[in-house]
Amino acid sequence: MKYKDYYNILGLERKATAEEIKKAYRKLARKYHPDVSKETDAEEKFKEVAEAYETLKDSEKRAAYDQLGSHQSGQDFQPPPDWGKQYGGSSFSFDDIDLSDLFAGLAGGRPNSNQRGSNISVPGQDYEVTAHITLEDAYQGTIVNLNISVPEYDENGHLHRVSRAFKTRIPKGVVDGQRLRLPGKGGTGFNGGHNGDLYLNIALHPHSLFRVSGHDLYLDLPVTPWEAVLGAAVEVPTLAGPVRLKIPPGTHAGQKLRLPKRGLPKPHDGEGNLFAIVQITVPTVLSERERAIFTELADISTFNPRGHFEQETKHEN
Amino acid sequence: MKIELTEVLWIDQYQELSLADLAKLSGLSETELNELVDCDAIMPINTNSTEWIFDAGCLAAAKTACRLRNDFELDTQGLSVALTLINQIHHLEMQLHDLRAQLPGRIF
């Protein structure tokens, strides 16, 4: 079992008072709580802080923790002889266990040996994992394999950290941030308490071509100046394969051309749209003939895209 | 070892939950949910009915409220203020995300 220095995590001396422990926790919880924090690794840091506070705020657990002695963080250690008997009765095994699991199993933890021995029903814990999938997976649906490491009690009431594997179908049409529920796949309930659920948060990998907004997709569509002026039919990629798109004559830069129902499928009805955003791209290397044609165009064209500057200036004078 | 395929349930506006369902899934009590509804922090679909129905999208807000209650020892008033602000932030982040999606990815 690896040692964690709960006092150090909360930035406290070992002789800190209960009030100091609470104050330090609240300060760090405000900083790292995943519902309110934008800090990097906020969730992991908050878990550490919450774990430390969960033990140190409870006088009995704190005394039990102090009895473990002081070690280097991350150092392998064994509790002193009789520690288990003194604090947890006979229901402790120190194999395959995490320090947080050890203290969760002490009185005041959930579910403790008393609860397991009584008739109080205790629901299993909910777990949450993030599934990172590609945009193509979201479009077609996919199957993902999940592995989670969770604390569980065995038939003798010993707490162990176990690995659980799931194979889950992600239906087509999920979007970034979508939450899905796997009922009963969380922690095991006790004394008739229902099993917890496993929640799956969907996170889409960024795509090299498409940007996602809900079920709509956005694609930059580079076009030549002459395609923009004269109009053209060009091939554009979609998640279902390439399609021909008509660029109307006189198309402007930034104009959004809609390809209906070429976005992500919606779970209950229809599909989102694909928007091709026109980017007029100019050649940087010209042949002599191209330069001559552009020069001729510049000479004969009466088009003035800045005409309104003059009008506005006259108006203001 | 063969792992069985598990089907998922959507959590969105098309799935409906009773007050008891929402309490069971979120970890909040029905009394706490009643108070959050009174503060408009969580809204049932049928506000005028005596038997409230919630869309499953409310589950995320209710679970957030449960975490905040446990982690900060907030009362329902504090929770409703925090939930309202978190909702506003999510709404603004989504608007920002949508606007960014419409911006060109490359500068020519």
Image: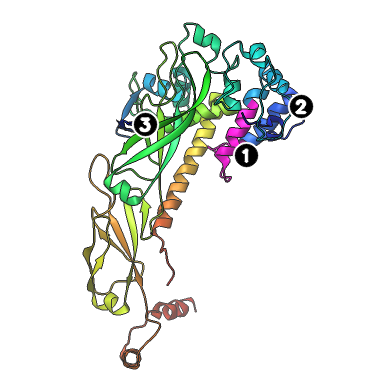
Q: Secondary structure at mark 3?
A: strand
The answer to whether tags 2 and 3 share a subunit is yes
Q: Is residue A51 magenta?
A: yes
Q: Nearer the viewer, mark 3 or mark 1?
A: 3
Measure how far apart labels 2 and 3 are at the Cα level: 41 Å
Q: Chain of mark 3?
A: A
| Three-letter residue code for mark 1 | Lys
Q: Are marks 2 and 1 on the same chain?
A: yes
Q: Which residues are magenta?
A: A30-53
Residue B32 is a magenta residue: no
Residue A115 appears in view: yes
The residue under the point 37% across, 38% down is A145
Q: Amino acid at mark 3?
A: Arg
Residue that mark 2 sits on: A16
Q: Earlier in the sequence, mark 3 or mark 1?
A: 1
- CA gap between label 2 and label 1 equals 21 Å
What residue does disc 3 label? A181
Residue B57 is at least partly visible in this image: no
Residue that numbered label 1 is attached to:
A31
Counting from the top left corner in percent of width and height, residue A23 is at: 70, 30
Q: Quadrant of residue A172?
A: top left
Quarter of the image where one finds residue B58: top left
The nearer-to-camera label among 2 and 1 is: 2
**SS at mark 2?**
loop
Residue shown at the point (56%, 24%) measured from the top left? A95
Marks 2 and 1 close (CB-CB < 8 Å) = no
| Image location (x, y in percent) of residue B99 | 42, 55
Judged by its main secondary structure, the magenta piece is helix
Query: Where is residue A217, by image quadrant?
Result: bottom left
Question: Where does the image place residue B105, in percent across and percent down from the top left?
Answer: 42, 63
Mark 2: amino acid: Ala
The subunit carrying tag 2 is: A
